[in-house]
Amino acid sequence: MTDELLTTKEASPYTKFSERSLQRLFQQQVIAARQPTGVGGQWRVWRSDLEAWVNGNA
């Protein structure tokens, strides 16, 4: 399995959270994510980190 970076739009269906809810979790550092850079930047999260959080291993 290759690890990949997901945007909030890609991660939202996987977690069943809205994009805005995921952004809040990223901002509060509940889930480790890469902060957006530049104007209109998007939060990104590694799939393995997201899977660990969903499975309760984070």
Image (cartoon, grey):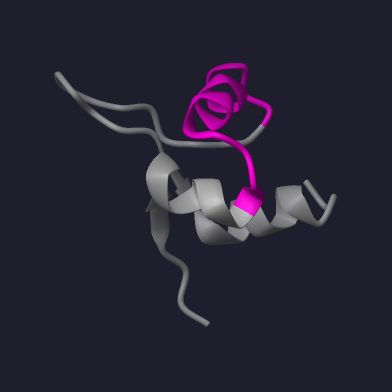
Tell me if residue 44 comes above or below residue 46 in the rendering. above
Residue at the location (53% across, 82% down)? 1
Q: Position of residue 3 (x, y in %)?
A: 47, 68
Camera-side residue of 48 and 8: 8
Examine the rendered structure and indicate whether residue 58 appears above or below residue 48.
above
Q: Residue furthest left?
A: 39
Q: How many marks?
A: 0
Does the stretch in magenta take in 10? no
Image check: 58 left or right of 34?
right
Left or right, 18 with respect to 58, comes to left
Where, by quadrant of the figure, is residue 32 drawn?
Answer: top right
Residue 17 image offset from top left, x and y in percent: 62, 39
Against 28, residue 55 (above or below) is below
Magenta stretch: give its range. 15-30
x%, y% of residue 18? Answer: 55, 34
At 56% from the left and 20% from the top, the residue drawn is 24
Q: Residue furthest bottom?
A: 1
Q: Residue at x 38, y 33 (%)?
A: 43
Q: Nearer the viewer, residue 57 or 25?
A: 25
Work out which residue is located at the far right of the displayed protein and give it.
56
Dominant secondary structure of the residues highlighted in magenta in the image: helix
- Rendered location of residue 2, percent (x, y): 46, 77
Residue 24 inside the magenta-drawn segment = yes
- Residue displayed at 41% across by 35% down: 34
